[in-house]
Amino acid sequence: MDTTEAETDTRPVVLAIDDTPANLRLLMELLSPDHVVRVATSGAEGLRLARSEPQPDLILLDVRMPGPDGHEVCRQLKGDVCTRDIPVMFVTGADSQDDEARGIELGAVDYITRPICAPILRARVRTHLRQRRQTRDLQRLAVIDGLTGLRN
């Protein structure tokens, strides 16, 4: 997709961060028809892409990665004014309750373990994207009068 196409594509942007190419391919396969899927193979690359335009509408994040692991990436995302409002959903093989609790405590909105059930993943992605869109709409309504278009 060239730059012009990317600028006019109205599909939600999903950023998948995982160090395993097969996991990224699966996520792209499952989500590409309805979403623009960007991928990062490390936590550092994921942080850079999360801060760049177009910013993702949702981030799918693995827990176990070299360098900054998923928990550290989530902590940094939630601590950055530019990325703190982007919902983070862990999609990971780390299935311990401690990993899940830590992820949620760090600010993740959801936690899915592998193996992935495609219909469940798609449904949860849709739900979190809908909530993000509704939150943005409410924030816009709080500062712009819906009738006149003027600032409140």
Image (cartoon, helix red, strand yellow):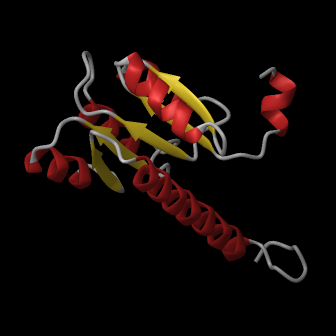
Residue nearer the viewer, 87 or 83: 87
Q: Does residue 46 appear anywhere in the picture?
A: yes
Q: What residue is rendered at 28% in x and 32% in y?
A: 70
Q: Position of residue 150 (x, y in %)?
A: 86, 73
Quarter of the image for residue 24 reads top left
Q: As displayed, is residue 142 above or below residue 96?
A: below
User: Is 30 placed left or right of 43 in the picture?
Assistant: right
User: Is 130 placed left or right of 4 in the picture?
Assistant: left
Q: As displayed, is residue 101 above or below residue 39?
A: below
Q: What residue is rendered at 61% in x and 69% in y?
A: 134
Q: Does residue 48 appear anywhere in the picture?
A: no
User: Is 114 placed left or right of 41 in the picture?
Assistant: left
Residue nearer the viewer, 131 or 36: 36
Quarter of the image for residue 43 reads top left
Q: Position of residue 7 (x, y in %)?
A: 81, 34
Q: What residue is rendered at 57% in x and 28% in y?
A: 38
Q: What residue is rendered at 49% in x and 52% in y?
A: 122
Position of the N terminus, as image quadrant, is top right
Q: Position of residue 107 (x, y in %)?
A: 31, 53
User: Is 127 placed left or right of 110 in the picture?
Assistant: right
Quarter of the image for residue 36 reads top right
Number of numbered discs present?
A: 0
Q: Residue furthest bottom?
A: 147
Q: Position of residue 19 (x, y in %)?
A: 34, 19
Q: As displayed, is residue 102 above or below residue 27?
A: below
